[in-house]
Amino acid sequence: MLTVAHLFAFAALLGYASAHFQLTYPASRGFDETKEPTAPCGGFDTVGERVPFPLGAAYIKLASEHEQANVRVMISFKTNPTNISDFTNSTTGQTQAPVRDFFQVDGEDICIGVNVKSIGYQNVTEGTPATLAVQYAGGDGNLFQCADIVLLSNATIPSNVTCSNEYNVPTGTGTGGSSGTPTASSSTTSSTGGTERSISAATGASILALIGLVSSML
Ligand SMILES: *[C@@H]1O[C@H](CO)[C@@H](O)[C@H](O)[C@H]1NC(C)=O
Ligand SMILES: *[C@@H]1O[C@H](CO)[C@@H](O)[C@H](O)[C@H]1NC(C)=O
Ligand SMILES: *[C@@H]1O[C@H](CO)[C@@H](O)[C@H](O)[C@H]1NC(C)=O
Ligand SMILES: *[C@@H]1O[C@H](CO)[C@@H](O)[C@H](O)[C@H]1NC(C)=O
Ligand SMILES: *[C@@H]1O[C@H](CO)[C@@H](O)[C@H](O)[C@H]1NC(C)=O
Ligand SMILES: [Cu+2]
């Protein structure tokens, strides 16, 4: 009998391990699939090289391996943030808004518009060091990636960072994120999202073909 377990075994044989997401711009401190559920930085708790990042309108980029996910972008101005409470938060009781509060993204190539300056964080100015954290819920729990930056008006996004699927800062909020009542989608335990993207339609077809072949030999 061929079972779902066989399907996964075949997928594993073919090299389609499950994966989550990566912050590709600014490049994350690192990616370790097994540690990625660890808040706030996916298991990478040491500050890395701080890269110049635009203080005003800009975007970050994710490689997303779930078809759909809820994401939130946070920032910390601590020298060495190691606790999620070191990052900006829109939850009741915290005054600083996140850079972008939870919203849904679809697809694998995702750019998220951000504008740190427009949020008006206290004392944030030319040359302020900071750490960005992205929280991502794609159906298998919350996942985290961080990048260390220096905020500069004259920083430019490298030309090889291109966007085909951009989620702009919502117009009218001026903050890039709601600081009001969290919506249903802003639960930290949100699990909206589909299946792992790791088995594409084409791969699925070839797995089915393989199963057909194996079955015919039984
Ligand atoms: C993070 O900070 C909160 C609030 O200060 C504290 O209760 C919690 O234990 C800390 N978590 C870790 C992992 O240090
Ligand atoms: C936001 O605050 C809530 C309640 O204090 C806490 O549970 C949550 O971990 C905080 N999240 C961040 C990103 O600071
Ligand atoms: C902002 O700067 C002022 C003046 O230097 C200082 O008194 C205040 O503590 C700073 N606030 C924060 C949140 O760092
Ligand atoms: C950008 O601004 C910073 C601080 O104002 C300055 O030190 C740096 O030289 C500037 N870089 C460029 C490329 O203009
Ligand atoms: C863009 O180029 C830089 C420097 O060559 C490289 O480190 C980075 O990985 C590239 N980024 C992308 C998204 O290709
Ligand atoms: Cu995943």
Image (cartoon, rainbow, N blue to C red):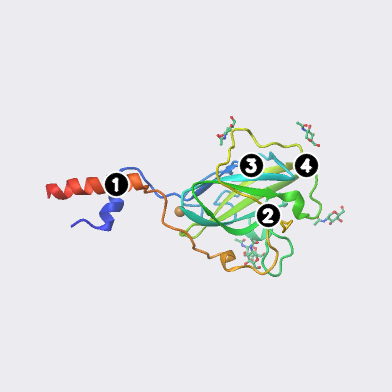
Q: Is residue 208 left or right of residue 18?
A: left
**Of residues 124 and 100, the one drawn nearer to the viewer in this rendering:** 100
Q: Report helix, strand or loop for mark 4.
A: loop
Q: Dot 2, crowdedness within 10 Å: few (<14), some or many (≥20)?
A: many
- The residue sitting at 61% across, 68% down in the picture is 183
Q: Earlier in the sequence, mark 3 or mark 1?
A: 3
Where in the figure is residue 52, as x and y percent of width and height?
70, 38
Callout count:
4
For marks 1 and 2, give the CA distance. Answer: 40 Å
Instruction: Tell me which label, 3 or 4, sits earlier in the chain.
Output: 3
Q: Are marks 1 and 4 in contact (CB under 8 Å)?
A: no
Residue type at tag 4: Gly
Q: Is mark 1 within 8 Å of ligand 6?
A: no
**Residue under label 1:** 205
Where does residue 24 sit, x and y in percent of width and height?
A: 56, 42
Label 3: element kind = loop
Q: Which residue is mark 3?
A: 48
Q: Quadrant of residue 102?
A: bottom right
For disc 2, the marked residue is: 99
